[in-house]
Amino acid sequence: MAKKESTFKNMTIALFVITAVAGLAMAFVYSVTIEPIAISQKAKINNAIKMVIPEFETILDTVLLPEDGKDSIRIHRLIKGSEISGNAIETYTDKGFSGRFSLMVGFTPDGTISNIEVLEHKETPGLGTKMALPAFKDQFKGLKMSDLPGEQLKVKKDGGTVDAITAATISSRAFCDAVNRAYTMNKKGGNQ
């Protein structure tokens, strides 16, 4: 069998075939996984809502509030019977040590924080990841932010009331930033 000469035309055809096969394979994998990923994301959000406002029966509605040209904040308004149970707010911050992370913050009808769940983050393992542990996030339970100076959460190092995670002050400040954003949006649109 004669050896084919390597020409520009042959290399172009081979590259095209390889690219087409790879593209089709990626499209197939995407089409197979898109629905399970969406179902998983929805279940993750629903579980977080149940963790931050356990006393609810139904999600009344979900409101998207734009935040000054940034990403929108999602507010899930919750009811039990005909009474409002509170709001579960998907919030975020871009001030984390490793960039953006997102939280679900639950507020009772009077504006008290009922609980907080970390949805996703990329913080340093063993340091910033401690924000997801009860030892850190439980200090926010029961706080009524309207009673705080300036209605803002701050770490003690900055004159606030929050005990920062040892060696992870940036992550702690970012956590406060995300909760402050949720509180602001809860006041703005949570009870419409």
Image: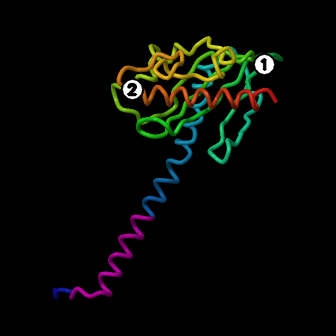
Name the foreground residue: 100 vs 5. Answer: 100
The quarter holding residue 178 reads: top right
Taking the magenta stretch, the answer to whether it contains residue 11 is yes
Determine whether 25 is above or below 115 in the image: below
Quarter of the rendering occupied by the N terminus: bottom left
At label 1, the amino acid type is: Ile
At label 2, the amino acid type is: Ala
Determine whether 94 is above or below 11 in the image: above
Quarter of the rendering occupied by the C terminus: top right
Determine whether 60 is above or below 141 in the image: below
What is the span of residues highlighted in magenta in the rendered image?
5-23
* Residue found at the far top of this picture: 142
Q: Position of residue 135 (x, y in %)?
A: 44, 13
Which label's residue is closer to the chain start, 1 or 2? 1
Q: Secondary structure at mark 2?
A: loop
Judged left or right of residue 22, residue 94 is right
Q: Residues within 10 Å of mark 1 (few under 14, many from 20)?
A: some
